[in-house]
Amino acid sequence: MTDAAPDRFPPGTRVRTYRHDPPHHTRLPRYARGKRGVVVEPEGPGELADLSAQGRGDAPVEQIYAVRFEARDLWGEGDHHVVLDLWESYLEADERSGSDER
């Protein structure tokens, strides 16, 4: 496993998850696709699970981020939040980017 690139999303960065539904395994839950969240912290590099689950020895190494989502944004209700560990390729900067005030 090689080192991942430096963190693209520092803590507090607003991100959005990708929307597409791949035909293969992915660690991005369906309920979190196309949703906005805030990066809590980088978790370190790891092989992209989508490809390593296929038994591929050439899975790229990417930064994994802990991303916080408001429950109401995921399910329409709830006053708590959910934190998911997500690979960098699942994320894009939210157009409304900037730091989140916690």
Image: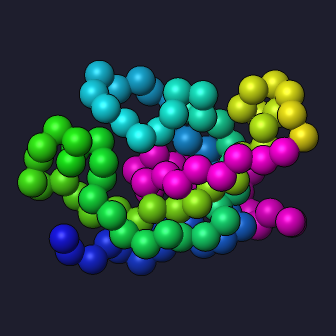
Which x, y percent locates residue 50?
Answer: 29, 42
**Would you say 28 lies left or right of 60 here?**
right
**Image quarter for residue 77?**
top right
Picture residue at 67% right of the left edge, 65% below the top: 40
Picture residue at 41% right of the left edge, 65% below the top: 63
Which x, y percent locates residue 51?
Answer: 22, 44
Residue nearest the viewer, comparing 1 with 99: 1
Question: In this view of the protein, can residue 14 be seen by the observer?
Answer: no
**Image quarter for residue 33?**
top right
Which residues lie in the magenta part? 80-102
9, above or below 70, in the image = below
Which x, y percent locates residue 26?
Answer: 37, 36
70, above or below 32, in the image = below
Which x, y percent locates residue 42?
Answer: 53, 70
Residue nearest the viewer, comparing 55 with 13: 55
Picture residue at 44% right of the left edge, 27% below the top: 20
Q: If the image is split into quadrants, where does the C terminus sit?
A: bottom right
